[in-house]
Image (cartoon, helix red, strand yellow):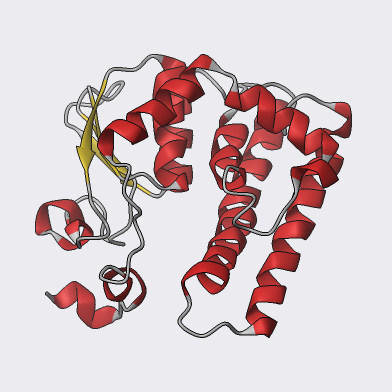
Amino acid sequence: MIDLYYWTTPNGHKITIFLEEAGLPYRIIPVNISKGDQFKPEFLAIAPNNRIPAIVDNEPSGGSKPVSLFESGAILLYLAEKTGHFVPSDLYGRAEVLQWLFWQMGGLGPMAGQNHHFRQYAPEKIPYAIDRYVNETNRLYGVMNKRLADRDFLAGDYSIADMAAYPWVVPHERQGQNLDDFPNLRRWFEAIRARPAVVRAYEKAQEISTNATVTEDSKSILFGQTAKTLER
């Protein structure tokens, strides 16, 4: 059984998508980040960066005690290796998947996240910051669109690279992006959206919460953190 510490964000969706695709038994433990649940000692014990998602694998392959992990990319890779699914075993296929997984972790996610912040949540609308992150998101969409011109998925076959990227494209309108400008990306996006496991993953999110994560009350919790926050 996998214990999944989760909230309804793109990084959280990555893991529910994998678990649904692989058919692994799991239990969701909600971590309401808008209320500060990410600072509770029991969560920090497995996720010292106070960010979701995190997992505890209570039945690790070849292990004698549970394995805990934080960081969505590390979790996806761990689960793929545990199950033998969604990451190739051959040298070249594995390299393809890993580079696109890390591309998402280092590029698409952080840039789209800053896009969301400055367009939607910043108390002061700073044109330079908005343009910077909207344009960089646009560039990254273009990278995906070009990559998908001659293949169905980012690394050839459907993989953890696609599971990592897809949730960050779901809010494309909020990011100031039009998928009609990226026909290959749109085709990829619609194919993943129609997958039964992806449908189930997003249904799980609806069961957990339909409320906005970022509210006026939650902004100081989500955006006002410093090192002293961890000293609570």
- The residue lying toward the viewer, choosing from 223 and 121, is 121
**Above/below status of 126 relative to 177:** below
Identify which residue is drawn at 39% across, 24% down.
19
* Residue 152 image offset from top left, x and y in percent: 77, 24
Choose between 55 and 13: the one closer to the eye: 13
Q: Residue at 82% across / 34% down in the picture?
A: 184
Q: Residue at x 67, y 42 (%)?
A: 100
Q: Specify whether residue 91 is in view.
A: no
- Left or right: 14 with respect to 149? left
Q: Is residue 55 above or below residue 35?
A: above
User: Residue 122: x and y, percent?
Assistant: 48, 77
Measuring from the top left, give residue 190's x and y in whole percent.
Answer: 68, 27
Q: Is residue 71 left or right of residue 159?
A: left
Q: Is residue 177 above or below residue 82?
A: below
Q: Position of residue 40 (x, y in %)?
A: 13, 59
Please state the total of marks drawn on the protein image.
0
Q: Quadrant of the C terminus?
A: bottom left
Would you say residue 19 is visible in this rendering?
A: yes
Would residue 41 be found to the left or right of residue 177 on screen?
A: left
Q: Is residue 9 above or below residue 125?
A: above
The N terminus, quarter of image:
top left
Query: Image quarter for residue 129?
Result: bottom right
| Residue at image coords 68%, 59% | 176
